[in-house]
Amino acid sequence: MNLFGYRLPGMSSLLLWGALWELVGHLEVTFFLPPLSAIFATLLEIASTKVFIKALADTGYAFFVGTFSAIVIGIPVGILMGKNRLIDEMLLPWVNMFLSAPLTALVPVLMVLFGFGLQAIIITTALFAIWIIVLNARAGVLQINRSLVEMAHSFGASPTDAFFKIYFWAALPEILGGVRIGFIRAVKGVIIGQLLISIVGFGALFELYSANFLMKHFWAVLLVLFSLAFLIAEFLAYLERRVAYYAARRAS
Amino acid sequence: MTKSTTNIEHAVTVRNVHKNYGDVQALENMSLDFPRGQLTSLLGPSGCGKTTLLKIIAGLLPATSGEIIVNGTPVTGPGPDRAFVFQDFALLPWASVLRNVAFGLELRGVAKSEREAIAEKYIANVGLAGFENSFPHELSGGMRQRVGLARALSVDAQVLLMDEPFSAVDEQTRRKFQEDLLGLVKNENKTFIFVTHSIEEAVYVSDQIAILLPRPSRVSEIIKPSGFRHKSADHIRRDPEYLDIVDNIWASLRSYVE
Ligand SMILES: Nc1ncnc2c1ncn2[C@@H]1O[C@H](COP(=O)(O)OP(=O)(O)OP(=O)(O)O)[C@@H](O)[C@H]1O
Ligand SMILES: [Mg+2]
């Protein structure tokens, strides 16, 4: 964006929207939208409270355990699908179905199966993240240069060697792309899980704040979640760009 | 290989090999001997099954029937007695030249310091000293194929299988490669099986040329240029026997080229 001939940094339009928000808040159009400054003040206030820190810790824990499992299971499964026709035909319909399925509808079932606690949230998070990770790892393997595989085979590579020394690395750019989207979906998963299982983490806070019409608190928590999700996505995009350097030159 | 088999005259023997891809019959009753320590070219029209034969010898493809014998032992899969040089180089784009050259040894479980010492020696041999830490995308096509060649040499296999190794490099580099190849054949005491499209190249580098016919492929003719092998590199291309053989091969192949 350019203003009076000056090049403005990437996110500067947010300042404008923030100012607008502040204005509307002061006009007291609706109780639903308190001024931004008041929200930040509330944020500072609650940030040090036990409930908030507990909610943040629980959410972080569920998020990382969930995405970690999705990555650790998803990448090998995707690579195996790309390598093996039979496994691929067995699993691909399910992966595609779950990728586009409204997973939110499954959360109540998960609650029944795994209880109303962190475990169900972790599994929800993993379920949101895993399918795109599987599909991307599979796509990465499918585009591998056949002669790399033949080369490894001709020099006597064991299946494990081929897996870790060829398939994984050759598919790495696609895998990382999948992990990034997986993380973004995991953010959705962890929040939706908490909202539906509203006795843990931020779900409990949301429940508390909205039931008592504590709008400043509500917005403060929401801002924290949005910023965290945004930061994670940006960080992963940065990592991906660092690996992409050779993706374009893989043909060699 | 054991002592008793190393003095067999032929390093590789192809016996009655058939290969079908579904309904497509690529090789029909192919038989061919590859003399030890010599370079044999496979020459023939596109699609006649040269790559197929090479991959069957490498153990990368199973034959539909028939057998391949390397140093007295039937081939059942890839083995340390054979090394492959790929037309498209097949280098790991994420690994340095050093690791690429050492990769064959790495897969065979050779310790890191040992395999890197061997790799460094062959990197220098193929003229790439100083590029150990470069990556494939930083090299020219000719240099990349030198890396592929160094990798194949460093595992010290007795049989080198080369599938159009010079077709992706420019003409001048290619001539240099051909001269270097003659040196390799003379000094390395290995058996080379070399696939090419180029009649001149085949006649220039080969001790024996097998002319293959179009699908289903058999050997139509075996030519053994002998008169000019001892001559120096620049004299070969002007040798009358060299020119005659090139003409004869072209005469027998031209009917298969539209
Ligand atoms: N995987 C495959 N499936 C089916 N047919 C194949 C396959 N690979 C090769 N063929 C067929 O077998 C025949 C021989 O192929 P091959 O690649 O060995 O020929 P080539 O002599 O190496 O050709 P070129 O000189 O163009 O490299 C061709 O007609 C090809 O269409
Ligand atoms: Mg070929």
Image (cartoon, coloured by chain):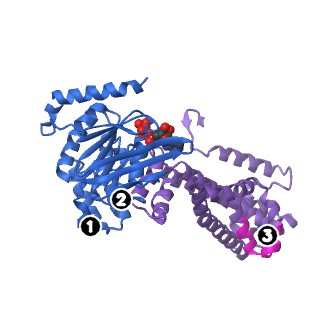
Q: Residue at x 18, y 45 (%)?
A: B183
Q: Position of residue B9 (x, y in %)?
A: 23, 54
Which chain is drawn using blue? B
Tell me the residue at 46%/47% (across/down). B18
Q: Secondary structure at mark 3?
A: helix
Amino acid type at image mark 2: Phe
Examine the rendered structure and indicate whether residue A213 appears above or below residue B33. Answer: below
Position of residue B184 in the picture relative to residue A221 (left or right) = left
- Tell me residue B185's x, y (percent): 21, 47
- Badge 2 vs badge 1, beta-carbon distance below 8 Å: no
* Marks 2 and 3 belong to one chain: no
Instruction: Measure how far apart labels 2 and 3 are at the Cα level.
Output: 47 Å
The answer to whether residue B18 is visible is: yes
| Chain letter belonging to callout 1 | B
Give the labeled residue for mark 1.
B2
Q: Which residues are magenta?
A: A108-124
Which mark is on residue A110? 3
- Residue type of the residue flagged with mark 1: Thr
Identify the chain of the residue marked 2, using the numbered disc in the image.
B
Q: Position of residue A224 (x, y in %)?
A: 69, 61
Image chain in purple = A
Q: Which is in the foreground here, disc 2 or disc 3? A: 2
Q: CA distance from mark 1 to mark 3?
A: 64 Å
Q: Residue furthest top?
A: B258
Question: Reading the chain from its start, which is encountered first: label 2 or label 1?
Answer: 1
